[in-house]
Image (tube, helix red, strand yellow):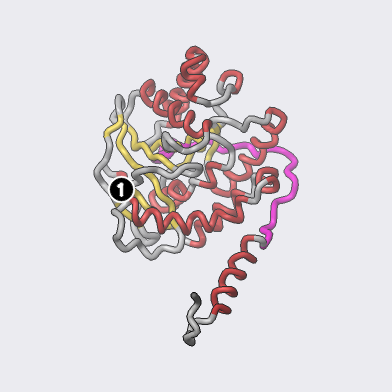
Amino acid sequence: MPSDAPSDVSSDDFDAYVEAFQALLHRPLPLPAEYDGPLTPRHVDSSRPVIAIVSPHPDDECIVGGLPLRLRREAGYDVLNIAATLGSNVERRDERWTELTHACNVLDFATVDPHFVDRLPLHCKRRESEPDSWRRDVARLAEVFAECGPAIVMCPHAEDGSASHIGTHALTLDALAVYGKPVWFVQSEFWGTMPSPNLLVELSPADVAILLRALVCHRKEVERNPYHLRLTSWLADSVRRGGETVFGAGLEPPSYDFGAVYRVDRWNGHRLEPSDRRGAVAAHESLSTFFEI
């Protein structure tokens, strides 16, 4: 039964907090005007260390782009976004490429369309049922790696909830085996949480604002589903979850407002070498030390 005892905690405070938060979820962010066409993507600068993001869809480069954004700004990396697909809607593919070039311009990421043969779905079932077409895509992605010589390759983790994300993970590992050179292998998450991330990266408000500015370039996607308005909530919750999963349950998490979790391991040119290292890197700390040999 409810207590009749007086309380110095007013429900008004909690009501106001929730209402203010709800208002933010419905506060519109400005979308860019209709694009006349795609921008010419800039080429990756292979004289710098390169992080290559194998993105299952246009917009993934924004959603999981916190780590590449910081490495570009803080450690001199160049970032190459590899558009593994342009989405399943054939009629929207040209438009999605246009949106992607504008998003990468905001992020200052180079981007490339690898033009996989026939643009077949990147699902693991095709790996088994259509091995010839899968091998062609693997060979093409390995060529892109050879062209840019990445120090870091990033893709979704193996259980990332979406068939295209899971397929992109498998394709990336197969391509690394063909490429045959050592790289840092970074796994990201979006549709499904990673069981064992080992890196929590703080993102400053300025970092998050840049990711949001780039994300709204995917105009039709955020008009269809305004997930851009929930990106800040997800990045805030990643600090809560990352603080427990990276370091262990029950420990005090870092006091970041926003963050992103990743899994960093070493690909030795032939197979994956799981790393025992775990860490949280604040906005004022160097990320580059996490990727030293």
The percent position of residue 208, horizontal first and vertical second, equals 52, 57
- Residue that badge 1 annotates: 290
- Identity of the amino acid at label 1? Phe
> What predominant SS class does the magenta segment belong to?
loop
Q: How many marks?
A: 1
Task: Depth check: give the residue in front, 72 or 120.
Answer: 120
In the visual, does 207 lie left or right of 292? right
The percent position of residue 7, horizontal first and vertical second, equals 48, 85
Position above or below: 249 against 102: below
The percent position of residue 175, horizontal first and vertical second, equals 42, 24
Residue 32 magenta-drawn?
yes
Task: Depth check: give the residue in front, 193 or 79.
Answer: 193
Q: Quadrant of residue 188?
A: top left
Kindly tell me whether residue 23 is visible in this rendering: yes
Residue at 43 percent of width and 36 percent of height: 159
Q: Please identify the residue farthest to the front as the structure is shown.
A: 1
* Magenta residue span: 27-53
Residue at 40 percent of width and 60 percent of height: 283
Residue at 61 percent of width and 50 percent of height: 227
Q: Residues within 10 Å of mark 1 (few under 14, many from 20)?
A: some
Q: Please identify the residue farthest to the top as the structure is shown.
A: 132
